[in-house]
Image: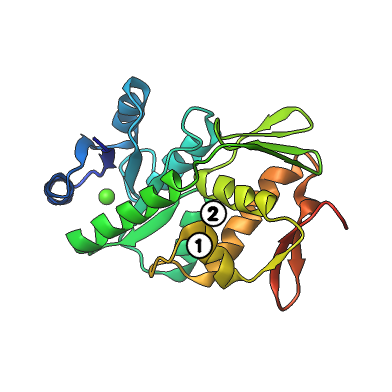
Amino acid sequence: MTRILVVEDEQPIREMVRFALEKAGFDVQEAGDAEAALLALAARLPDLVLLDWMLPGMSGIELARRLRREEVTAQLPVILLTARADENDRVHGLDVGADDYVTKPFSPRELVARINAVLRRVQGAGGEGVVEIGGLRLDSASHRVEAGGEPLALAPTEFRLLRFFMTHPDRVYSREQLLDHVWGRSVFVEERTVDVHIRRLRKALSAAGCDRLVQTVRGAGYRFSARP
Ligand code: CA
């Protein structure tokens, strides 16, 4: 059964979310703050974390950052819950490593749809094979990426983006095409989300000097190539 960890300090919301998710067939675990969430994560990894932005003590954003930094949780899908509808906050949330974003108040139906969309994306990233291009080595089976023999920690969306690029090199893809291939035809994702994840992917690759492989093609989109 797919397990979801719900991190939310407001009990009525937690209960509403639990009710909706259990009805949708998920196994739900609750945490009232980031510290409780870390304990729950150390005991057993869920399939996805639903994380409230505003928490007492360590904020949801801080926790999301921390999860991305740790090797064990770097690939764990995270959906942020927030009362803020502001577009800058939205982008900021994606920047710290969230896979998606749900603004309160949300309907249980919308929440379940978003969770399923993120899980589909993660599960769709499977497939066998090792690809090597420009000093990068990506193993789909083990979800490992190495640059010059050193392991790279990538969030789930960046991993799928890189996997798509590495299996489709030297071709230009528009943002819309990347959304279709990497995110699937989800009605919830905007084209600028692609730019956010491209930026994060480049940042992750830059430590190994491999960010040059992800190339911007002005007016057209992005291309992955070992050629300048
Ligand atoms: Ca809260």
How far apart in space, not on screen, are marks 2 and 1 (Cα)? 6 Å
Q: Is residue 208 left or right of residue 164?
A: right
Q: Residue at x 46, y 32 (%)?
A: 73
Q: x, y (%) of residue 59?
A: 39, 44
- Which residue was labeled with disc 2? 95
Q: Is label 2's Cβ within 8 Å of ligand 1? A: no
| Residue closest to the eye, 37 or 100 | 100
Q: Is residue 89 above or below residue 96?
A: below
Is 112 situated left or right of 214 in this image? left
Residue 105 relative to residue 48: left or right? left
Local SS, label 1:
helix
Residue 123 occupies quadrant: top left
Quarter of the N terminus within the rendering: top left
Is the residue 218 above or below the residue 133 in the image?
below
Q: Looking at the image, which residue is at 25% across and 44% down?
A: 8
The amino acid on which the numbered mark 1 sits, given as a three-letter code, is Val
What secondary structure is found at the residue carrying circle 2? helix
Q: Residue at the spot x=78%, y=45% of the render?
A: 210
Report the residue marked by disc 1: 91
Image quadrant where one finds the C terminus: bottom right
In the rendered structure, find residue 72 and report the number of the disc placed on it: none
Task: Where is residue 45? Give x, y as percent.
Answer: 36, 28
Classed neighbour count for the residue bearing mark 1: other residues with Cα under 10 Å, few (<14), some (14–19), many (≥20)? some
Mark 1 CB lies closer than 8 A to ligand 1: no
Residue 216 image position (x, y, % from top left)? 74, 66
The reply to whether the C-beta atoms of the residues labelled 2 and 1 are less than 8 Å apart is yes
Task: Give above or below for 61 relative to 217.
Answer: above
Q: Amino acid at mark 2?
A: Asp
Q: Position of residue 49 (x, y in %)?
A: 34, 41
